Amino acid sequence: MMWNIAVNELRRQLQMISILVVTFIVPLLLIFLLGSSLSGSGKFKVESRDPEPFKAGIVQQDQGVLAQAFAQFLTADDVRQWIEPIAYADREEVIRLIRDGKLGFGLVIPSTFSDDVLNGRQASWEMIMGNDYANNLAAKSVFGAYLDIVNTQQALALTAEHTGSSAAKNGIPPAAGTLMQGSAGEQQNEAAIVEVNPMQDQPNPTAMQYYSVSILVMYMLYTGMSLAISILADRQNYTFHRIMAAPVRPYSYMSGKLIGQSLIAVCQAIFMIALSHWLFGVDWGRDIGALVIVCLLLIVSSMALGSVIIAYVREEKSIKGLFQFLVITMTAISGGFFPISEVQATVGPFTLSHWAMQSMLRIMMNGGWSDTLHYVLPLAGIAGVLFLLAVWSFRKVVNYA
């Protein structure tokens, strides 16, 4: 009986032209309109621009002879053109401020830095990536080139010990203007990279990619509304009463409804992903397995949310109004309509849409499973909580009179 209810649910939904249009056609139109109209926005591509200084948190743990030289380096005009350095004592505070979007970059200089240089050991720093690709690139160029020159000075100092010259041993790293000519690609062996938001250190997604993700997440969440309205319709036309009067267990009825609506959500996801790739050239990344997991977690969350709402709301207008308020609000503050970094960093993490979008975006940018897992785990936690609430509300759904 459960599968009969599921098949009937699927057939009934797919026979309604209006539902087919809203479920499959409208999302693609929104992706095209938003993606094409906002593709020129600086939010979605790295473009040439006049340098604007960004705040960088500096944790100076080194008190050796090179600390003063670095302090002088930070005051140079060529450095100030790019970076506004702010001193901090705690590394964790810098990471927190970067995660909240209040700092653009972080640099931690270990206490052994001067000793390492003077004793012929490799000098190393820790660079903490921020939220902006261009700022990260600029900071790595400035600090990475400086560190590269320090290591060069170290080699000269060691050579001076054999030639009897003391000039190189006491040399101070050159002015910032010289350092700006260094290559950021040469510092990987001298600086440990810490990525607070790993995707942000990669080229930004295109507008089509970004809105393909946001519209997919938004419309998959709306599937829960379809579930709630379908159950309400069964109550109002007494189909629910007839099924409950038959030898059908309540969980079979509810399972059939959930399976039917979940299959529609799966078809919607496949349709949107395939058509956006074929029509608009959207690259969804190489990790299809991770993308499937995120979509399944979204379906579970949406179905659970619909089950909870139908347990307490008895009118169709109220169901639609509540769902639209929740989904649109979550989409807006998670940056689904337009990315606003301040809002996304502060309020966004409290929404389901934020974790789903960020998971998919990192899959798109091929950030690797370890990077994506940072966002998939909170999404799984939210889905689990909603599922438990749905189970707890189950009796109110099936004991409706």
Image (tube, grey):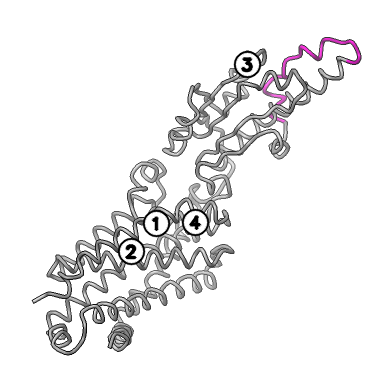
The amino acid type of the residue labelled 1 equals: Leu
* Residue 337 visible, this angle: no
Q: Quadrant of residue 47?
A: top right
Give the quarter of the figure containing the N terminus.
Answer: bottom left
Residue at mark 1:
379
Q: CA distance from mark 1 to mark 4?
A: 14 Å
Q: What distance separates the C-alpha of mark 4 from that of mark 3?
A: 40 Å
* Magenta-span inclusion, residue 52: no
* Residue 276 x, y percent position in the rendering: 49, 69
User: Magenta stretch?
Assistant: 162-181
Q: In the image, which is nearer the foreground, mark 4 or mark 3?
A: 3
Q: Is residue 209 visible?
A: yes
On screen, residue 308 versus residue 81, left or right, reads left
**Label located before the other in sequence (1 or 2):** 2
Which is closer to the viewer, label 3 or label 1? 1
Report the predominant secondary structure element of the magenta stretch: loop
Q: Which mark is residue 301?
A: 2
- How far is disc 3 from disc 1 in space, using C-alphas? 44 Å
- Image quadrant assignment for residue 157: top right
Above/below status of 351 relative to 80: below
Q: Amino acid at mark 4?
A: Leu
Label 2, label 4: how far apart the Cα atoms are: 19 Å
Q: Which mark is residue 361?
A: 4
Compute the Cα span from label 3 to label 2: 52 Å
Question: How far across and how far down the image is residue 253, in percent?
Answer: 24, 81
Circle 2: element type:
helix
Q: Secondary structure at mark 1?
A: helix
Q: CA distance from mark 1 to mark 2?
A: 9 Å
Instruction: Identify the residue at image location x=31%, y=70%.
Output: 223
